[in-house]
Amino acid sequence: MKENTTHTKEDLKMMQSLPLSIKVRMTEERIRQWYQHWGGQVCVSFSGGKDSTVLMEIARRLYPDIPAVFSNTGLEYPEIQKFVREYKNVDIVTPKVRFFDVVIRDGYPLISKEVSHGIAIARKFKKGNENKHKREELLGTRYISGTNILSVYNKEKWLPLCTELPVLISDYCCDKIKKQPVNQYKRKHGYKLYLATLAEESMLRKQGWLKHGCNAYDSSDPKSQPMSFWTEQDVLEYIVLNGLEIASVYGDIVSVDEAGDYYSPIDLLGGCRGGLKCTGCERTGCIFCGYGFHSEKGETRFQRLARTHPKQYEYCIKGGKWSDNPYYDPTVPKMDGEWKNWNPKKIWTPSEKGLGMGKLFDMVNEIYGKDFYRYE
């Protein structure tokens, strides 16, 4: 029986508030439904992160022989790559292009996928008033018809990055480096994927859940996200209660009270003293990704990278150079009505010495304040 795909924001809040034991049973049911619907032609997309480690444990408890695929982009922490190789029946795929090359051709990933995508496309509209609405829709600056409410994807704050920053920006790196190798693999084998994504992680994922539910049978790209209604705390609690091993880059999972004091997570057995957190990385993903970096509290991911992986940090922050803009067009006017066209002659790019993200962060800080990006 298929999951009901008519969902509301209230449904999601209610499901997120359920006890973990009930969430586990619901996730198990969605895994079974997906498996049975596709006749067992399914596969776990395994990143080596803590969320997908939980998904792998649940899926293989139900179906021990279920295959998994890991996209080795070369951008993961070394500890993640080592952790993945300790698993059996995990196929490893690699991209055809490097992050370095994607950044030079398409741009750096900044702020979020939604913002990077909007900037990349909006910059292409340089002439003609008919493009005004297209740009406004992409950047979310149009008001919803008949109201004074901006689109939920409002990116008005980021307009200076779109028009002023002499840097290519896009969301293409994830598609070309991570998704394409996995998509080629699943098409080759005829698999339908399980992914360990959580709706709370982004507006885009929340909207996807509201439209399709956990099992997106009717999507143009069918996939199962059976943990969508879990929270970060659920994932950490499951790991602790089940003694699940995760990659060492996360450090230990501890319970933290309001004063910021750490306690053993075993307190969960008698009632947790506070929220759970990792003493190492909270999220792993690609080491050099800039998504969400500006909103991090305390020690940021790049400050931590400098402390724990200095070689990767040096490559990320150092280097860079001014290069000719391959998209520069001398015939494009400076302004298109009230819109300032992005058309610099020179842009900041990676160099043979590094990605040059330190200079990039400094330029963004000039716009939004010196502590917007904290990387040193």
Image (cartoon, rainbow, N blue to C red):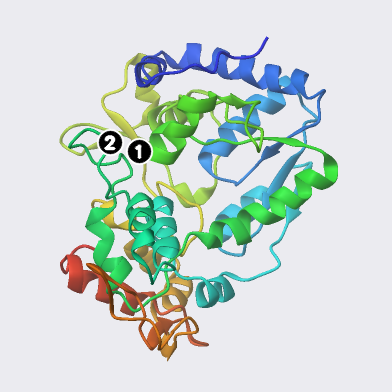
Given the image, on which type of amino acid does mark 1 rest?
Answer: Lys
Which dot, 2 or 1, sits closer to the camera?
2
216 sits to left or right of 104:
right
> Crowdedness of circle 2 by 10 Å Cα count: few (<14), some, many (20+)?
few
Front-lying residue, 356 or 244 = 356
Give coordinates of residue 150: x percent, y percent: 24, 41
Question: Label 1 belongs to which residue?
Answer: 277
- Name the residue: 77% across, 27% down: 64
Question: Label 2 belongs to which residue?
Answer: 145
Front-lying residue, 87 or 132 = 132
Given the image, on which type of amino acid does mark 2 rest?
Answer: Ser
101 sits to left or right of 170:
right
* SS at circle 2: loop
**Any part of residue 312 in sight:** yes
Give coordinates of residue 83: x percent, y percent: 62, 49
Q: Earlier in the sequence, mark 2 or mark 1?
A: 2
- Name the residue: 19% across, 74% down: 366
Front-lying residue, 102 or 155 = 155
**Any part of residue 240 in sight:** no
The total of numbered circles placed on residues is: 2
Image: 319 above or below 126 = below
- Name the residue: 28% across, 37% down: 144
**Which dot marks residue 206?**
none
User: Distance of mark 2 from mark 1, alpha carbons?
Assistant: 42 Å
365 sits to left or right of 118:
left
Give coordinates of residue 258: x percent, y percent: 17, 32
Image: 4 above or below 114 = above
* SS at circle 1: strand
